[in-house]
Image (cartoon, rainbow, N blue to C red):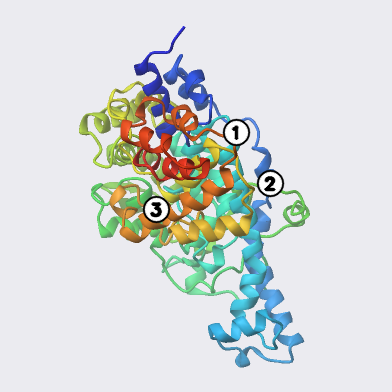
C-alpha cells in the first residue's frame, strides 16, 4: 500500500525535528504512526549506549583537575624550575615546543592532559547520536544538558560535563523535573562550576572560626572558601527554574544562596576512592556532601515563604517549591516549545505544556506526550534551523561515511561555533536561527557539505534517492531538480547537504 504524502511529511517531522535526522528507510517505517514512534522513546533508558560505557566515572572526572595540578607541579620540578618561573607562552613558542624544542608552559601541560580526554567524550556523544535507534530520547538528553549547563570552558570543570550529562540529563530526561533539578544542584560538577563549594554563610561556624589549612584532596578544585557566593542560587532561579521574569528579587537570590551554603562535596573515603577504577559506576549523588559548619544558620525567606533552618533539608524544601512553581512551568514550557515548534514559541502551545507540567507535578514524559499530541509542532515543516552539532549528526545519520575521530570532531565543531561540552556561559547554546545564520557560519556549512560529500559519495549512492529517503515530501522541487542535474554523486550530495531543506528541521 502506498504511503500518503501527509503521513510521510509527519514522518519527516518526527525524524528530523523531534529526532536527530532521518536515515534511509526511516520515513517508511515511521509513517505508520509518527506520534506512537516518538512516544515509545519516552521510556527511561535501561542501559547506557555502548559508546558511553567506557567513559570515566564521575569521581574520576571530578579528580582530574586536581590530579593535573599535581602532575603540573611534578613537571615544573622535573624541569628544574619553580612556579615563579612559569609564564604564558607565545604561539610561536608553543609551536616550537610542539616540534621538539625546549621549554615548558602551563598551557601546553593543560592541553596535553585534557584535550585527548575531551576528544574521547565528544566521539562517544557523536557516535551515540549517529547510531541510536531512539533519536528523540537522545535529543532530549542534549536539550536538558544545554538547560542545566556545566561547561569545559572553566578549567576546574574541563573534565566534568560528560559525567554530568550522564548523571543528570540522561538519567532524568523523561522523569520528573524536580528530580533532575535536584540531581543537577547536588552534582559535584555544578557545585564546582557555579562556585558553591566556595560559598560560606557569613554567620556560619566556618566564617567565625576558620579551620586550619589542610592538604589537597579531590575536593580542592577551587580556592579556599572566603564568603557567600550567589552564583549557583542566581542561575538556579534565572536559568534552571523560574526564569529572569519569574517573580524573584535580588533579596531572594541572597537568601537562597544562604540556604545552600554547606552544599558541597563528600569527604573522600576509602570506599569512594576504591570505586574510582569502575568507569561509569559512580554517580553525582554519591559525591554530594553537606557541611553544617559552612551553613548559614537561621530561617530564610524566599518569594514570600519563610523556611526554617533545618540544615540540608532547608535547601531541599526550597528546590521542591520552585520546581513546581507556575513560573517554572511557563519557563520550561517556553523553552520546549521554542526547541520543538518555532523560534517564536506559539503561546497556545506554551500554555498547554505549562498546564500539563503543573497538573502532573513536572512529569516530563507527560509534558512531552502533550507536545507530541499538539498540532503546532506538526503544522509547518522545516521551521527550525539546525545548530552545527545537529547538522553534522544528521549528515552521518543520512549516509554512513568515513570515520570521524575525536580530534576531527573537535576541529569541525569548534570551527562551526558549537563545540559540545564547551558552552561559553551557563545559559547554554542559543536555540534561535539568528545566532547561527551569519555569513561566515553559513559559508562554513557549505564548505563542510562539499568536503563531507566527497567522503560520502560512491558510484552506487544515488543522491536523488537519498534526498527523497531522508527528506520525504519536505524536499522542494528546485532542490530536487538541482540534485538530479548534478554532474557527479559528490556534487549531488553536496547540494543535498547544503540545501535549505537539509539545513532545517
Q: Earlier in the sequence, mark 1 or mark 3?
A: 3
Give the x, y percent position of residue 219. Answer: 62, 65
Residue 376 position by quadrant: top left
Tell me the element at label 1: loop
Name the residue carrying label 1.
460
* Disc 2 from disc 3: Cα separation: 26 Å
Question: Could you tell me which residue is drawn at 21 percent across and 33 percent down?
Answer: 347
Please determine whether, in this image, residue 313 is positioned above or below residue 73.
above
Please determine whether, in this image, residue 111 is positioned above or below residue 4.
below
Which numbered mark, 2 or 1, is in the foreground of this view?
A: 1
Residue that protrudes farthest toward the top in the picture: 1
Residue 423 position by quadrant: bottom left
Which numbered mark, 2 or 3, is in the foreground of this view?
A: 3
Question: Could you tell me which residue is drawn at 64 percent across and 52 percent down?
Answer: 58
Q: Residues within 10 Å of mark 1 (few under 14, many from 20)?
A: few
* Disc 2 from disc 1: Cα separation: 41 Å
Give the x, y percent position of residue 33. Answer: 45, 15
Q: Earlier in the sequence, mark 2 or mark 3?
A: 2
Circle 2/circle 3 CB separation < 8 Å:
no
Give the x, y percent position of residue 309. Answer: 42, 52
Circle 1/circle 3 CB separation < 8 Å:
no
Q: Residues within 10 Å of mark 2 (few under 14, many from 20)?
A: many
| The C terminus lies in quadrant | top left
Question: Could you tell me which residue is drawn at 59 percent across and 86 percent down?
Answer: 93
Q: Is residue 232 visible?
A: yes
Name the residue carrying label 2.
280
| Label number found at residue 429 | 3
Amino acid at each position: 500500500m502506498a504511503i500518503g504524502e501527509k503521513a510521510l511529511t509527519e514522518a519527516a517531522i518526527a525524524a528530523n525535528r523531534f529526532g536527530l535526522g532521518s536515515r534511509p528507510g526511516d520515513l517508511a517505517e515511521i509513517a505508520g504512526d509518527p506520534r506512537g514512534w516518538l512516544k515509545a522513546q519516552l521510556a527511561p533508558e535501561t542501559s547506557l549506549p555502548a559508546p558511553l560505557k567506557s567513559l570515566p566515572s564521575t569521581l574520576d572526572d571530578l579528580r582530574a583537575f586536581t590530579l593535573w595540578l599535581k602532575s603540573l607541579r611534578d613537571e615544573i620540578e622535573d624541569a628544574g624550575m619553580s612556579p615563579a618561573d612559569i609564564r604564558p607562552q607565545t604561539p610561536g613558542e608553543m609551536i616550537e615546543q610542539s616540534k621538539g624544542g625546549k621549554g615548558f608552559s602551563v598551557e601546553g601541560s593543560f592541553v596535553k592532559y585534557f584535550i585527548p580526554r575531551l576528544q574521547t567524550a565528544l566521539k562517544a556523544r557523536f557516535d551515540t547520536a549517529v547510531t541510536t535507534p531512539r533519536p528523540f530520547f537522545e535529543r532530549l538528553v542534549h536539550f536538558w544538558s544545554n538547560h542545566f549547563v556545566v561547561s569545559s570552558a572553566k578549567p576546574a570543570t574541563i573534565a566534568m560535563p560528560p559525567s554530568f550529562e550522564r548523571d543528570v540529563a540522561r538519567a532524568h530526561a523523561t522523569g520528573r523535573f524536580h528530580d533532575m533539578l535536584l540531581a543537577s544542584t547536588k552534582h559535584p560538577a555544578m557545585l564546582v562550576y557555579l562556585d558553591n563549594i566556595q560559598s560560606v554563610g557569613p554567620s556560619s561556624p566556618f566564617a567565625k572560626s576558620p579551620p586550619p589549612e589542610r592538604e589537597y584532596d579531590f575536593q580542592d578544585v577551587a580556592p579556599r572558601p572566603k564568603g557567600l557566593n550567589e552564583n549557583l542560587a542566581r542561575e538556579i532561579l534565572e536559568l534552571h527554574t523560574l526564569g529572569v521574569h519569574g517573580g524573584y528579587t535580588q533579596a531572594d537570590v541572597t537568601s537562597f544562596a544562604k540556604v545552600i551554603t554547606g552544599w558541597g562535596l563528600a569527604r573522600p573515603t576509602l570506599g569512594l576512592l576504591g570505586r574510582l577504577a569502575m568507569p561509569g559506576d559512580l554517580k553525582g549523588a554519591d559525591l554530594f556532601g553537606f557541611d553544617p559548619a559552612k551553613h548559614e544558620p537561621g530561617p530564610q525567606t524566599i518569594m514570600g515563604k519563610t523556611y526554617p533552618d533545618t540544615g540540608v533539608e532547608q535547601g531541599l524544601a526550597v528546590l521542591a517549591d520552585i520546581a513546581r512553581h507556575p513560573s517554572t512551568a511557563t519557563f520550561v514550557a517556553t523553552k520546549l516549545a521554542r526547541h520543538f515548534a518555532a523560534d517564536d514559541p506559539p503561546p497556545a502551545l506554551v500554555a498547554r505544556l505549562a498546564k500539563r507540567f503543573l497538573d502532573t507535578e513536572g512529569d516530563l514524559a507527560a509534558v512531552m506526550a502533550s507536545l507530541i499530541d499538539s498540532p503546532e509542532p506538526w503544522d509547518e515543516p522545516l521551521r527550525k534551523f539546525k545548530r552545527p552539532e545537529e547538522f553534522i549528526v544528521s549528515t552521518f545519520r543520512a549516509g554512513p561515511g568515513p570515520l570521524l575521530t575525536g580530534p576531527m570532531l573537535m576541529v569541525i565543531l569548534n570551527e562551526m561555533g558549537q563545540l559540545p561540552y564547551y558552552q561559553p556561559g551557563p545559559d547554554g547554546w542559543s536555540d534561535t536561527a539568528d545566532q547561527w545564520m551569519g555569513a561566515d557560519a553559513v559559508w562554513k556549512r557549505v564548505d563542510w557539505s562539499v568536503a563531507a560529500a566527497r567522503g560520502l559519495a560512491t558510484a552506487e549512492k544515488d543522491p536523488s534517492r537519498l534526498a527523497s529517503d531522508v527528506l520525504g515530501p519536505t524536499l522542494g522541487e528546485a532542490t530536487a531538480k538541482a540534485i538530479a542535474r548534478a554532474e557527479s554523486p559528490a556534487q549531488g550530495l553536496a547540494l543535498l547537504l547544503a540545501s535549505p531543506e537539509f539545513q532545517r528541521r
